[in-house]
């Protein structure tokens, strides 16, 4: 059985890794949304955006609407 200090450190490291993952995920989602908005403002259709990123055009619309 691992000692209590090692377990405590492992738990702390795990929580930090999860928090970093969540932060980076939110940042990436915001960056993607901004990219979709810029592409739409530039005149690309949902279908054209979807072809570029490999998502269905209805999913692009959902993302833009915040769904």
Image (cartoon, rainbow, N blue to C red):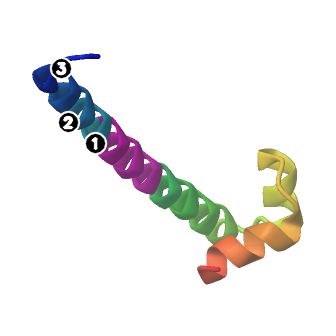
Question: Image height check: is 53 above or below 49?
Answer: above
The x, y position of residue 43, in whole percent, is: 73, 69
**Residues in magenta?**
17-27
Q: Residue 25 colored magenta?
A: yes
Circles 3 and 1: CB distance less than 8 Å?
no
SS label for mark 2: helix
Residue name at image x 72 percent, y 77 percent: 62
For the residues carrying marks 3 and 2, which lies nearer the camera in this image? Answer: 3
Q: Are marks 3 and 2 in contact (CB under 8 Å)?
A: no
User: Which residue is located at x 66 percent, y 61 percent?
Assistant: 39
- The quadrant in which residue 6 appears is top left
Of the pair 22 and 26, the residue shown nearer to us: 22
* Residue at the disc numbered 3: 6
The secondary structure making up most of the magenta span is helix
Against 35, residue 15 (above or below) is: above
Dot 1 and dot 2 residues touching (CB under 8 Å): yes
Residue identifier under label 2 = 12
């Amino acid at each position: 059985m691992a000692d209590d200090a090692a377990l405590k450190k492992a738990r702390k490291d795990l929580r930090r890794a999860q928090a970093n993952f969540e932060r980076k995920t939110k940042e990436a989602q915001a960056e993607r949304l901004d990219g979709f908005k810029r592409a739409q403002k530039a005149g690309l259709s949902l279908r054209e955006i979807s072809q570029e990123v490999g998502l269905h055009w209805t999913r692009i619309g959902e993302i833009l609407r915040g769904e």
